């Protein structure tokens, strides 16, 4: 496979993975790509949590971020070229209803870097409040796959997971390859391997995407399957057959950040030639 073809494939797989029904006018988070979950994954379990008034998956994915910078390197070997863009979001830039629901002072810097074989996304959180706050963070990555019956996810065996489909039941993953043939919504905890492999089961030569992470603990695997797909107005009824979300983050427990402190974490998606 040539680099050009490979780049096209990566872009096709990772970049165009938004639903045909996705709402793109800013009124709803885009169903595709990598929506950013912060500071709350799902909705808060406890009504006393500071994030309890926030909508599902928090504020970052439905706020308009500020473009901060873009840089590119131009190497002799173009395989090493890298394009990087940074974006910022502060508490005062979030929509009023979200700001009121979680009135914390914070600064987020989101860095996205693209090379021929990798897509890196990294988030820096600064607590600018007078008090410590708790947050979750998750890169909610949608992968486009030709056929869900041929998709498998490696690197999750022997991990404990919480099964949201089974009302939060906990179990141990025994499979080397996690496959999907029904609704799946699981939080795999304490992912010790920093390499999860999503085998998208391409017909002409397999396309495996490796996910490595920095400073993140959990991996969520999600496919809405038939009934949930029908219930989502911004998702085509048939699209569950051609997608899977494998989401890297810290969501089983909150991260506690003291005033003035920074936290940083991220993921690298990479394909091999
Ligand atoms: C996953 C959650 O991360 O996101 C699921 O584990 C949820 O429970 C899914 O259904 C999609 O969420 P939303 O808010 O984009 O419909």
Image (cartoon, grey):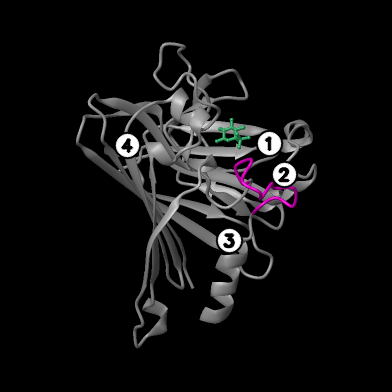
The residue where tag 4 is placed is: 106
Tell me if the residue at label 1 has its CB under 8 Å from ligand 1.
yes
**Mark 2 burial class by Cα count in 10 Å: few <14, some 14-19, many 20+:** many
Mark 4 vs mark 3, foreground winner is 4
Mark 3 vs mark 1, foreground winner is 3
Q: Main secondary structure of the magenta part?
A: loop
At which x and y percent is residue 77?
37, 85
Q: Which residues are magenta?
A: 18-30
Instruction: Quarter of the image for the N terminus: give it.
Output: bottom right
- Contact (Cβ within 8 Å) of mark 1 with mark 2: yes
Instruction: Please name whichever residue, 15 or 92, is drawn nearer the observer in this view of the structure.
Output: 92
Q: Earlier in the sequence, mark 3 or mark 1?
A: 3
Instruction: Please name whichever residue, 237 or 242, is drawn nearer the observer in this view of the structure.
Output: 237
- Per the model, the C-alpha gap separating discs 4 and 2 is 36 Å
Q: Which disc, if any, is residue 80?
A: none
Query: Residue 90 occupies which quadrant of the picture?
Result: top left
- Per the model, the C-alpha gap separating discs 3 and 1 is 20 Å
The residue where tag 3 is placed is: 15
The residue where tag 1 is placed is: 224
The residue where tag 2 is placed is: 240
- Contact (Cβ within 8 Å) of mark 4 with mark 2: no
Q: Secondary structure at mark 4?
A: strand
Q: Secondary structure at mark 2?
A: helix
Q: Give the image quadrant in which the ligand numbered 1 is located.
A: top right
């Amino acid at each position: 496979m040539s680099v050009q073809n490979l780049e096209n494939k990566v872009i096709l797989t990772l970049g165009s993975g938004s639903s045909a029904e996705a709402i793109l006018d800013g009124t709803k988070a885009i169903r595709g790509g990598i929506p950013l979950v912060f500071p709350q994954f799902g909705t808060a379990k406890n009504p006393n949590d500071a994030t309890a008034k926030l909508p599902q998956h928090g504020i970052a994915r439905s706020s308009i971020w500020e473009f901060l910078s873009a840089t590119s390197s131009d190497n002799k070997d173009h395989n090493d070229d890298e394009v990087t863009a940074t974006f910022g979001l502060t508490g005062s830039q979030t929509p009023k209803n979200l700001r009121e629901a979680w009135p914390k002072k914070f600064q987020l810097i989101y860095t996205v870097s693209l090379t021929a074989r990798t897509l890196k996304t990294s988030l820096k959180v600064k607590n600018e409040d007078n008090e410590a706050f708790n947050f979750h963070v998750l890169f909610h990555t949608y992968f486009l796959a030709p056929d869900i019956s041929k998709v498998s996810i490696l690197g999750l065996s022997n991990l404990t997971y919480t099964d949201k489909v089974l009302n939060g039941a906990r179990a141990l993953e025994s499979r080397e390859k996690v496959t999907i043939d029904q609704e799946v919504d699981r939080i795999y905890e304490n992912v010790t391997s920093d390499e999860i492999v999503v085998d998208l089961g391409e017909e002409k030569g397999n396309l495996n995407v490796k996910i490595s992470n920095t400073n993140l603990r959990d991996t969520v695997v999600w496919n809405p399957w038939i009934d949930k797909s029908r219930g989502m107005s911004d998702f085509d009824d048939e699209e569950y057959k051609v997608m899977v979300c494998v989401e890297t983050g810290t969501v089983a427990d909150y991260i506690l950040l003291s005033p003035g402190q920074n936290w940083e974490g991220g993921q690298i998606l990479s394909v091999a030639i």
